[in-house]
Image (spheres, coloured by chain):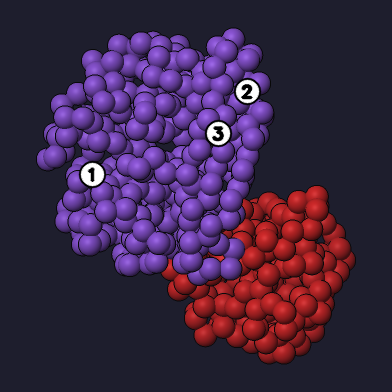
Chain colours: A purple, B red
Amino acid sequence: MPIQNKFISFVLVFGAVLSAIAGTGVSLQVRLEEVLAIGGPDADLLFQWTGVSVDRDDQIFVIDTLDYSLKKFDPHGRLLGKVGRRGQGPGEFEKAVGVSVVGDSVYAWDLSVRAVQVFDRNLVYRKSVPLPGLVDGLGCAPDGNLGVGILGPEGFPKIIVIDSEGKIVQEIVSREKEDRLFGDSVRFVFGPAGETYSGFLFRDLVEKRDPSGVRIWAKNPWGTKSVQLREIRGFKVPTESCVLSVARDSRGRIYVLGGKKAPHPARDVLIYNSDGVPAGGFLLPDASHSLYFDHRDFLYVAADGGVTLKKYRLVID
Amino acid sequence: MRKQSRLGRVGIIGTVLGGILGIVAAWGETDPVDLRGLLGSRFALVLIDVDGLACEPCLAALREFCRAVPSAVQEERVLGVLTFRAGKTPDSRLGRIARTKWAGYSRANGIRFPVTLDESLSFNRLSEAGTTVLLFDPRTGRLKRWTAPFGPPAIEEIVRFLTTSETTIMETQT
């Protein structure tokens, strides 16, 4: 795919307003410069991508739920390879939702299987690591272990830390009972000292916890007081999304993508510093389900309903 | 199986015929599907809303339909109509996105029946409740409609209708 050098500038009045409301007095001015687009409405390449991760060589791994595939692109967006088909066996996907490259391993997960599949960077299937719940997210901890967001059998989300063999070495469970919500989902990233920054799909909550799981700070990004619930088959389940994605750049800033509770659903991004102080925000040009920063701090988001993956340079004044 | 009764028989037939005419009118600019083999004989319309591609029960119903209906029958007697929700202002991008998503999904699932994009939005009202199958017999003007999830009796009747003699009488159920 050709690199699109279109320059897209978004002056972020929105971020300034939010920071002013929060009384921080600090508001980052952010502009987005588009540096790459993969797929598109007329391309036969991506159909509903759900996860992206970039390796140390800037190769881009994308998982797509509509064609059950894991794809690999070079830094210019050219397709290098593709694996996967529908199923629940090795190298197969039923409801593919995420991918994360850690070292030479490519972890891919699926909402229908209690395991993470491991591929090498050439997309060769290596093994599956069984887990005690459905996988919702995965990230590398500073000590080399893996943090896995799972929806446990009891219906509450939690983060577990596993070693390379899949053995659970720690559980990071929300200790505050009022924060537990049946059917919720957790998005998280690790900080350099092993701390976690988490956001919840259906609870208006972003929090930082230390490596032992103790909460350091918590924020309500969209000022929502209550969770809207709907009864389905006897279960009260949440219906309106709050936090779609949480990402962290190399400077330690935390980026939170808002769901339906945000003024511009799937487009509003709030920025916090590592101490939880609001630092501004910006508006994505198109709705996205995900935010992802690579090791060079390029931002990857969805566009065109998931048939396009866009890569941006953030220019922060 | 869920029976739909909000639209009357005449309304549904009118919608189907109007939609088909709309699709025929748009031919040449959309998917290369030949309708001549369908018109005049029994056939099934499968209405697929692109938003349903994110709905697992809708996809499961579609896969069940494809598993049950023989490939040759799918190719000859089934026409898919891909619907999408347009915004307040016309945006051709939405239709192109819908077509691209369907291309990826149908190829990955080996779906054999031809599908066209409902650029006229004629079928939106019928498809909004989920994947819908309309069995239509132009000779008698009779039709049946099911909206996903389909139960085994519905699947059985769909297959029987599409594979048995044209002279079989079918009751209208609306």
In the picture, the disc for residue A16 is 2
Residue name at image x 48 percent, y 66 percent: A2
In the image, which is nearer the foreground, mark 3 or mark 1? 3
Circle 1: element type: strand
**Total residue callouts:** 3
Label 2, label 3: how far apart the Cα atoms are: 10 Å
Tell me where residue B100 sits by quadrant. Answer: bottom right
Report the amino acid beneath label 2: Ala
Among the two numbered marks 2 and 3 on one chain, the one whose residue lies closer to the N terminus:
2
Badge 2 element: helix
Q: Quadrant of residue A121?
A: bottom left
Q: Residue at x 55, y 12 (%)?
A: A24
Whether discs 2 and 1 lie on one chain: the answer is: yes
The alpha-carbon separation of the residues under discs 3 and 1 comes to 29 Å
Tell me where residue A94 appears, x and y as whole percent. Answer: 38, 55
Badge 2 or badge 1: first in the primary sequence: 2
Q: What is the chain identity of the residue bearing mark 3?
A: A
Provide the chain ID for the residue under circle 1: A
Q: Nearer the viewer, mark 2 or mark 1?
A: 2
Of residue A315 and residue B8, the one placed in the foreground of this image is: A315
Q: Which residue: 46% across, 67% down?
A: A1
Are dots 3 and 1 on a single chain? Answer: yes
Q: Which residue is mark 3?
A: A30
Please state if B82 lies on the left or on the right of A65 as rendered. Answer: right
Residue B13 as seen in the image, left or right of residue A255: right
Instruction: From the top left corner, tell me how far across and down residue A205 is, in percent.
Output: 48, 20
Is the residue under label 3 in contact with that under label 2 (CB below 8 Å)? no
Q: Residues within 10 Å of mark 2 (few under 14, many from 20)?
A: many
Q: Quick one: A20 or A72, which is closer to the camera?
A: A20
Residue A238 x, y percent position in the rendering: 55, 27
Residue hosting label 1: A102
